[in-house]
């Protein structure tokens, strides 16, 4: 018997939208290849929590894909019963099938309408679909505190804090203390606060669906079947409890470390070099004046990118991105008291 994910990956044309009701009353809606939704037998749309769990926006980030697939199968076989409305999205099926981050373009740069600029590539088509499904899913719920989207990833490289989340730009809305607690209970060790609009999926949902939305990085990229699931136990338990308990509200003793994004360094030219080894872990710290990267332009002029604050840590370095795209973020640690929280 193939799983929903396997059928979505290998026989997507056979997946037709349909609805069914399981023996335990659970409502199942198959919406598209890779998109499936569960809801309790009876619910009030304005009272129930609405949760989107997306994974595989990058096709080779397998751990969250495996976690979500296991939850989908547990729901379908009725070994667990949903107490919330939850939509699972297996995002980049084509990239999963070739074991790559993406086919043509990094999908997590295509949201908030950016897909319109890349109309002919598979990632753009899918990003547009995902936006529509997510808007539809949240449309019946008008309470921000019942709307959640966790976009689940794994990082390309090792990190001092392997499990971290990106809190998208809130445009003046306060940060949620509750969500920080929830993320802590999921094993998240650090949260990056973004201060600008971006074209990531979680920013799209935060902005357009008025949901609590996060990009969540759970450990490191490995091939399907190569993940040590014990590394992900806390996140597994978190997702399970979130779906099966509508009063789930963990209060964690620990607050994740908080980091403000300090610099976004773009690859401005072909000859762009990072000044540290490829395997330098995320969150490695550097001191003021340390040069992190150099670019040399066609007119032989060069530009250096130094640390500007007393101390900055590097995140998501990738010198081989397309020219014009982000090659590196730097972050500075801040305290909880520096934030406006509700
Ligand atoms: Zn990713």
Image (tube, rainbow, N blue to C red):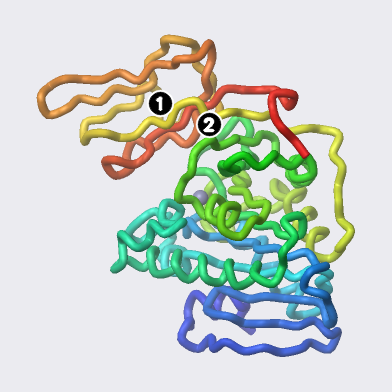
Q: Element at badge 1?
A: loop
Q: Which quarter of the rendered picture does the C terminus lie within?
A: top right
On screen, 196 above or below 76? above
On screen, 257 above or below 107? above
Q: Dot 1: few (<14), some (14–19), or many (≥20) neighbours within 10 Å?
A: few
Q: x%, y% of residue 339?
A: 70, 29
Q: Which quarter of the rendered picture does the N terminus lie within?
A: bottom right
How many numbered badges does the structure rendering display? 2
For disc 1, the marked residue is 277
Q: Decide which of 182, 74 is in the foreground and name it.
A: 182
For disc 2, the marked residue is 282
The answer for how far apart the CA atoms under marks 1 and 2 are is 12 Å
Left or right, residue 217 beside residue 118: right
Residue at 31% from the left image edge and 66% from the top image edge = 119
Furthest-left residue in this view: 299
On screen, 207 above or below 334? below
Choose the circle earlier in sequence order: 1 or 2: 1
Q: x%, y% of residue 13?
A: 46, 86
**Disc 1 residue lies near ligand 1 with CB under 8 A:** no
Looking at the rendering, which quadrant does residue 188 occupy? top right
Q: Residue 197 carries which label?
A: none
Residue at 36% from the left image edge and 21% from the top image edge = 275
Q: x%, y% of residue 246?
A: 86, 63
């Amino acid at each position: 018997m193939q799983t929903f994910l396997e059928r979505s990956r290998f026989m997507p044309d056979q997946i037709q939208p349909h609805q069914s009701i399981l023996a335990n009353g659970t409502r199942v809606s198959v919406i598209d290849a890779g998109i499936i939704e569960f809801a309790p037998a009876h619910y009030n749309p304005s009272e129930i929590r609405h949760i989107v769990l997306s994974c595989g926006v990058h096709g080779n980030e397998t751990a969250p894909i495996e976690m979500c697939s296991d939850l989908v199968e547990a729901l379908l076989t009725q070994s667990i019963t949903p107490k919330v409305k939850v939509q699972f999205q297996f995002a980049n099926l084509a990239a999963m099938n070739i074991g790559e981050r993406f086919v043509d373009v990094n999908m997590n740069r295509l949201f908030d309408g950016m897909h319109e600029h890349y109309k002919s590539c598979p990632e753009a088509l899918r990003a547009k679909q995902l936006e529509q499904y997510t808007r539809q899913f949240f449309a019946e719920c008008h309470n921000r505190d019942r709307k959640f989207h966790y976009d689940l990833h794994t990082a390309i490289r090792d990190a001092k804090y392997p499990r971290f989340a990106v809190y998208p730009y809130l445009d003046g809305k306060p940060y949620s203390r509750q969500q920080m607690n929830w993320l802590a209970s999921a094993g998240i060790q650090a949260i990056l606060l973004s201060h600008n609009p971006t074209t990531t999926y979680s920013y799209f949902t935060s902005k357009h669906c008025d949901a609590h939305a996060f990009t969540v990085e759970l450990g490191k990229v490995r091939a399907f079947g190569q993940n040590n699931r014990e590394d992900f136990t806390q996140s597994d338990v978190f997702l399970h409890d979130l779906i099966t308990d509508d009063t789930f509200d963990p209060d964690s003793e620990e607050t994740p470390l908080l980091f403000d994004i300090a610099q976004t360094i773009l690859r401005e030219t072909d000859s762009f070099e990072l000044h540290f080894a490829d395997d330098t872990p995320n969150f490695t710290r550097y001191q003021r004046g340390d040069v992190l990267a150099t670019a040399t332009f066609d007119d032989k002029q060069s530009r250096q990118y130094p640390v500007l604050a007393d101390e900055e840590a590097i995140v998501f370095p990738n010198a081989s991105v397309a020219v014009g795209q982000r090659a590196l973020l730097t972050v500075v640690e801040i305290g909880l008291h520096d934030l406006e929280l509700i």
